[in-house]
């Protein structure tokens, strides 16, 4: 298979930053909401509902609380690998290198703002402890500018280094 007429996405880093924030916030809200529902069901006035909730809902809640962080990390790392692979397989035109640097710089500056806002959410007394419980995602969000810089630099190297390709912009497989 030969990749033809494929153009490199200059905004991959910015898209990754947005997805990282959305995943972190969504998984945090999901864990928080599920914990609230579990607490209400377990502490309900009905003995039947409370017993059933202790046997069914509480174990499900514990599984959700422990696995959302891992799932978020897998999604974000998978996106990073996807960016690297797509940049490796696409031949970037050197004319767009300056544009890539500008957009990557904007993305890195944007990631600092997103990281600061996420850290402000962790300071929130309502949902902050739930967000902080996702330690892996919180680590990524805390150091988001560093991750964005590494992704932009390595992705740019893969995109513009001129690896051996066929003339028609693709690697013959």
Image (spheres, rainbow, N blue to C red):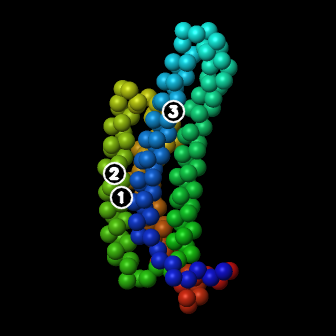
Place of residue 57 in the rendered image (x, y in percent of width and height, measured from the top left): 62, 24
Is the residue under label 2 in contact with that under label 1 (CB below 8 Å)?
yes
Place of residue 45 in the rendered image (x, y in percent of width and height, measured from the top left): 54, 9
Position of residue 97 relative to residue 76, above or below, is below
Q: Residue at x 36, y 60 (%)?
A: 107
Q: Which mark is residue 31?
A: 3
Count neighbours of disc 3 (C-alpha within 10 A) and say few if under 14, some if 14 to 19, many if 20 or more. Answer: many
Q: Which residue is mark 2?
A: 112
Position of residue 85 relative to residue 93, above or below, is above
Q: Residue at x 41, y 44 (%)?
A: 142
Displayed quadrant of residue 100: bottom left
Which circle's residue, 3 or 2, is located before the other in the chain? Answer: 3
Closer to the camera, 48 or 167? 48
Q: Residue at x 52, y 71 (%)?
A: 87
Closer to the camera, 110 or 55? 55
From the image, state whether disc 3 or disc 1 is nearer to you.
3
Q: Secondary structure at mark 1?
A: helix
Quadrant in which the N terminus is drawn: bottom right
Q: Secondary structure at mark 2?
A: helix
Place of residue 62 in the rendered image (x, y in percent of width and height, measured from the top left): 61, 28
Is the residue under label 2 in contact with that under label 3 (CB below 8 Å)?
no
Quadrant in which the C terminus is drawn: bottom right
Q: Which mark is residue 108?
A: 1
Q: Residue at x 41, y 50 (%)?
A: 144
Displayed quadrant of residue 12: bottom left
Which circle's residue, 3 or 1, is located before the other in the chain? Answer: 3
Closer to the camera, 37 or 138? 37
From the image, state whether disc 3 or disc 2 is nearer to you.
3
Measure the alpha-carbon separation of dots 3 and 1: 29 Å
């Amino acid at each position: 298979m030969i990749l033809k007429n494929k153009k490199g996405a200059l905004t991959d880093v910015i898209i990754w930053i947005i997805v990282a924030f959305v995943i972190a916030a969504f998984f945090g809200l999901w864990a928080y909401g599920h914990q609230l529902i579990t607490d209400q069901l377990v502490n309900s006035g009905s003995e039947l509902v409370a017993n059933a909730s202790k046997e069914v809902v509480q174990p499900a809640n514990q599984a959700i609380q422990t696995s959302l962080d891992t799932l978020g990390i897998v999604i974000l790392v998978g996106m990073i690998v996807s960016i690297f692979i797509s940049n490796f397989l696409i031949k970037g035109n050197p004319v767009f290198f300056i544009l890539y640097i500008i957009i990557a710089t904007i993305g890195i500056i944007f990631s600092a703002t997103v990281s600061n806002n996420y850290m402000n959410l962790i300071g929130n007394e309502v949902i902050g402890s739930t967000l902080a419980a996702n330690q892996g995602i919180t680590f990524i969000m805390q150091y988001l500018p560093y991750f964005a810089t590494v992704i932009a630099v390595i992705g740019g190297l893969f995109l513009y280094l001129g690896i051996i390709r066929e003339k028609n912009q693709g690697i013959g497989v």
